[in-house]
Amino acid sequence: MKIADFYEELWAPSYGPPRGSIRDHLSPGPYEDEQQVLRYLRAGHLLFSAMGSSQDVLGSGRSVLGGDSVYSDGEWMWRGDLWFYVRTHHLTLPDEFLREIREAGYFMTPEDTDRLAALSAYVADRW
C-alpha cells in the first residue's frame, strides 16, 4: 500500500512516518495534463467515507467536502481533498504515482473487490 499524499499535515501518525510537510512538495505551476490527473483522482474507489469538510492546511480559508475520505486505485491511496491541493496549490504527486496514472491513460483501474476490502480494513484500523 502506498499513500500518494503522505504528508504530516494530512495523515495521522498511525500510518507511519510521513514524507515531510506538504509545503515542501509544491510547484510553481500546474501539470500540463492537470485536468486528466484531477479526473483520475476524483474517480478513485472509495475506501472510507468521512462526513463533513476538511480545511485547507495551507491557509486559503477554503474547505473541501469529504476531504477526509480515502480513495484508492488498488495500489495507491489518497485523501478526498488531494485533487484540491493539486489544482489549487500545485501539489506534486509522487513520480511513480503520476507515471502510473499516465500509463493507465488517466482511466481508473477496474474495481478489485478483495484488494479494496483489504485496503479499507487497513484504513479503518488506523483511523
Image: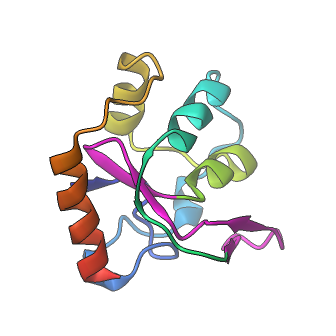
Rendering coords of residue 46 (x, y %): 43, 54
Q: Is residue 76 magenta?
A: yes
- Is 10 in front, or is 25? 10
115 lies above or below 51: above
Q: At 25% from the left edge and 51% from the top edge, which residue is drawn? A: 116
Colour mode of the rendering: rainbow
Q: At 62% from the left edge and 66% from the top edge, which residue is drawn? A: 66
Residue 95 relative to residue 113: left or right: right
Rendering coords of residue 95 (x, y %): 38, 36
99 lies above or below 127: above
Q: Is residue 82 magenta?
A: no
Image quarter where the N terminus lies is bottom left
Q: At 22% from the left edge and 46% from the top edge, which residue is drawn? A: 113
Q: How many marks?
A: 0
Farthest residue, direction front: 113
Rendering coords of residue 59 (x, y %): 77, 73
Corner quadrant of residue 39: top right
Give the residues drawn in magenta, as a range: 53-79
49 lies above or below 34: below
6 lies above or below 87: below
Q: At 60% from the left edge and 51% from the top edge, which residue is drawn? A: 26
Rendering coords of residue 42 (x, y %): 57, 42
Residue 16 relative to residue 45: left or right: left
- Is 28 in front, or is 93? 93
